[in-house]
Amino acid sequence: MRGALHRTRSKARHDPSHRLIHRQEQGRDRRVDGIVDGLSVLTAIPHARLLEIARNRKTDPLSDEIDVVVYGEFDNDAELAAYKAHHLYQESIERVRPLRELRFAADYDSAKVAPPA
């Protein structure tokens, strides 16, 4: 949990991840930049409490398939639904879809995470 956010409130979370199309192709960095730029329009959507878009640092030795990660926190499911219904969400899809090969997404409720062991 980040600084000023409180775990006592239930928050919906949205975490789509994208993999670049033609990973071995020349100009790969430029294409990843295009994905980041296309996803950056999402930051203008007002419904997220927190929205981060970043290149994957690829420090996990077991997985390097994901190039770009979007992480979002929403106060509730209604805010998440409003975010996904916003016209800029569709614009982002239209800009990014031609550049990516895969998209993984996970939506979950932070109040229902597994307790620490």
Image (spheres, rainbow, N blue to C red):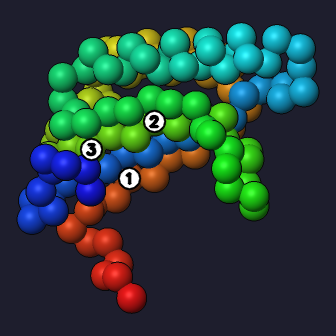
Q: Amino acid at mark 3?
A: Glu
Query: What numbered label is drawn on residue 49?
Result: none
Q: Kindly indicate the quadrant of the structure image that contains residue 62.
A: bottom right
Q: Which residue is mark 1?
A: 107
Q: Amino acid at mark 1?
A: Asp
Q: Residues within 10 Å of mark 2 (few under 14, many from 20)?
A: many
Taking 40 as reference, is 19 left or right?
right
Q: Earlier in the sequence, mark 2 or mark 1?
A: 2
Query: What numbered label is drawn on residue 73?
Result: 3
When the figure is inspected, residue 6 is found, relative to residue 98, above or below; the finding is: below
Looking at the rendered image, the quarter that the C terminus falls into is bottom left
Q: CA distance from mark 3 to mark 1?
A: 10 Å
Count of numbered circles on the image: 3
When the figure is inspected, residue 94 is found, relative to residue 78, above or below; the finding is: above
Looking at the rendered image, the quarter that the N terminus falls into is bottom left
Query: What numbered label is drawn on residue 70?
Result: 2
State if disc 3 and disc 2 touch (CB < 8 Å).
Answer: no
Q: Position of residue 71 (x, y in %)?
A: 40, 40
Q: Is residue 103 visible?
A: no
Q: Position of residue 18 (x, y in %)?
A: 61, 35
Taking 84 as reference, is 17 left or right?
right
